[in-house]
Image (cartoon, rainbow, N blue to C red):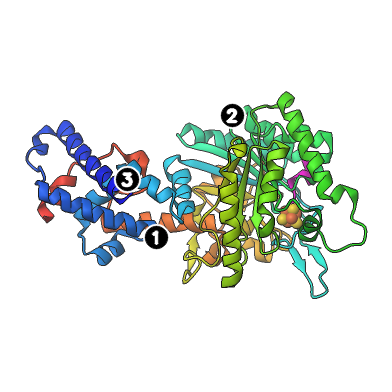
Amino acid sequence: MKHVLKQDLYHEFLGIEKDIETKWPFMGNRFRVANPWKRELVEKAWTVADILKTHPYLSGEHMSEQTGLGKDHLAIIYKMIQRSSACQEYFKHSSNRDYFNVVSHYFNRDFYTLVFFVGTSCPSRCVYCPSVKIDSMGRRRLITYKDAMESKLSDDALERVFDDLSTIKQKGRDILVKISGGLEPLTDPATMEKIIYLSNRRSFPVKLFTNGLLLSDPTNRNIALMASDIRISLSTSDENLYRSICFPPSKQPLKQNTLNQLKNNIRMLVLERSVINPGCKIGFNSIILPDNHLHLVSLLEMARDLGIDYIDFKPNYFSSYDEKTQAAMDVSVREAKVVSSHESYKDLYVNFTGSLSRNDLFWSAWNGTCDAIKQSDFKLFITPYGHCSPVHYGAFPHGEPSFQNTLESYSMGEITPHRGLLDILDKPDRTPEIDLNKLNPFELMLNLEISREDADKKWGLPLCVSPYQTSQRDQIPPDLFFRFTQET
Ligand code: SF4
């Protein structure tokens, strides 16, 4: 691997040399780099790539302190890494692959993601849900929005949001719409239907996140199947475990709240998809917990037998575990990975997110506040009442009216028929100051990368040499080699 990487880095160095010669023939010959320097540069580029693999958010200045490389050396090394597909693959297969995927999604593909929290209730009471409070007696209480004083997003306001998304799209960004929670979106199928309709009318992909229980209703299935992707939260194939994860203990569980019923809902969904919308993907969002990790293989078997398209395994990023528990969970994940590589799983895409546990480096020693406005340039969450939060946590029900107290500290403003999405993004009513520890891991990674790029720009490394901005491959600063040869 090391050898292949170094070869690819060398190859990219030659490519940069050639591109400079083609673009600026009068400069190329003048600043040709001697062979021994090239070899040394490749060695150093390998060292830098290895550090970035474990500390992807490290700023150029800190990298310079760690490696002794000057800014201009680093500029060309970053450019080699950015252009090297072998390096990018190396990053994407590392334990920090989530970081590189986040960067690729938001920075290279340039997606703007708008997440609608639609639901105002939920039939489940999951143990890991941030909206569920469990008391000392084991009773589970669902925290909902206290909405007595507020009205939900009107049709006119929704239309206006989508007009604004079209404007963002016209400016060259891709749009991704998500319908999520918060609480269960299928508790408000009418709003969900409007959002899917408005997305489809503008050809924006729309992903629906649901616990799947209310898909027992054929009307709900019809609406859901108009989305591009239906992601069902399901973390076990065991009926008893399902009940204990998703519901408080009871003598007689309701028939509509059983795993058996949920499996029937999914079978119907898969069957009807072929008629209603064959392009719609159906998958599982599965959280690996101390309680269910011994059942991952049977969950895989169930997913395959139900005929769904993918399964995305994630850790519970709201918790951390002791070493022994974590090690046991890791063994189960390794076993599930081996099983999923078998031929019989060829139609099921299985993904294990890599670096999302609270035990890992992203969470340790990370404190401070997040620049909410910059974060909202990439992603925004809208509550059922129109409040806009740049972070997931801010759009959750906190048991308060959403214009008061806790939620106000996360809201940048409220969408109304007279105040659209772009108004709020351009001139927010408030600039919420949000503790980094309130961010979910993906948001934290986005924040770290925004900060890394800002720091590099200030230090004098332009965006076009960022090691992860592969879409900037052909953007070469004219003084790249000049600066390099001066430094050498
Ligand atoms: S299904 Fe989702 S919203 Fe409902 S309790 Fe479970 S995690 Fe929370």
Task: Please provide percent x and percent y for residue 3.
Answer: 27, 48
Mark 1 vs ligand 1: CB below 8 Å? no
Residue farthest toward the bottom in the current orientation of the protein:
136
The furthest residue to the left: 30
Determine the secondary structure under disc 1: helix
Magenta segment includes 188:
yes
Are discs 3 and 1 less than 8 Å apart at CB?
no
Which mark is on residue 54?
Answer: 1
Q: Residues within 10 Å of mark 3 (few under 14, many from 20)?
A: many
| Quadrant in which residue 416 is drawn | top right
Image depth: mark 1 or mark 2 in front:
1
Q: Nearer the viewer, residue 425 or 445?
A: 445
Residue shown at the point (11%, 46%) measured from the top left: 35
> Residue 82: which numbered mark, if any?
3
Magenta span? 183-189
Q: Which residue is mark 2?
A: 203
Badge 2 element? loop
Tell me which amino acid carries mark 1: Thr
- Which label's residue is closer to the chain start, 1 or 2? 1
For the residue carrying disc 1, how many other residues have a C-alpha within 10 Å: few (<14), some (14-19), or many (20+)?
Answer: some
Taking the image as shown, residue 413 lies to the left or right of residue 15, namely right
